[in-house]
Image (cartoon, rainbow, N blue to C red):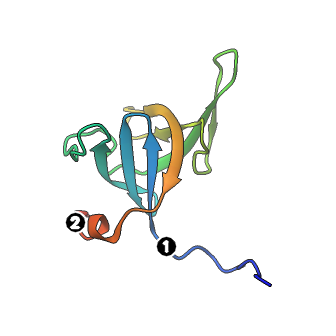
Amino acid sequence: MHMQSTSPERRRHKVFVTRNTEYHFRDRLCVAVRDRRTGDFLPGHLALKRELAGGVHRLNNGTLIPREDDPQPGEALYFMANGLDLVTSPLIRTERPEKTIVRNYRF
C-alpha cells in the first residue's frame, strides 16, 4: 500500500509551460525563459529575475481574478515589479526541468 507523503515539497525548480514559452523557476524566482519553438533561451525576457506574484484566472466575461497561489492550467502567470506588470498567455502544464538544464541556470 502506497501512503501519500505529507512532507513539504523539497524540489526547488519547476517549469511553467505556455503555448510559446517555458518559464523556469527556482522557488518563485524566474531564472530562465525559453522559446518552445526554437529551444533558445531568451536572455532579455521581462520575466527574468522577477518573482512570480501568482496566477490570473480569466472569467468568461473577461474579468481577471489574481491569485497568490501558483497558476493552474488555463491561468496566466503574473509578475509584478515597479509598475511593469507582466501577464503571460495561459498555462498549459507544469513540469520539472531536466538536471542538465538546472546546472546551466545563472542565478
- Residue 21 at what x, y percent from top left? 36, 39
Q: Nearer the viewer, residue 33 or 49?
A: 33
Q: Is residue 30 above or below residue 89?
A: below
For the residue carrying disc 2, how many other residues have a C-alpha within 10 Å: few (<14), some (14-19), or many (20+)?
few
Residue placed under numbered mark 2 in the picture: 104
Q: State left or right for residue 43 relative to residue 51.
A: left
Q: Is residue 16 above or below residue 106?
A: above
Instruction: Look at 60% across and 35% down and name the residue there.
Output: 74
- Residue 55's image quarter? top right
**Amino acid at dot 1:** Arg
For the residue carrying disc 1, how many other residues have a C-alpha within 10 Å: few (<14), some (14-19), or many (20+)?
few
Q: Is residue 50 above or below residue 26?
A: above
Instruction: Look at 20% across and 40% down and name the residue there.
Output: 44
Gap in Å between the C-alphas at discs 2 and 1? 17 Å
Q: Is residue 7 above or below residue 91?
A: below
Q: Nearer the viewer, residue 86 or 92?
A: 92
- Residue 71's image quarter? top right
- Residue 69 at what x, y percent from top left? 62, 50
- Residue 33 at what x, y percent from top left? 30, 47
- Residue 46 at what x, y percent from top left? 30, 38
**Amino acid at dot 2:** Asn
Residue placed under numbered mark 1 in the picture: 11
Seen as rendered, the residue at the extreme front is 1
State the quadrant of the N terminus: bottom right
- On residue 23, which mark appears? none
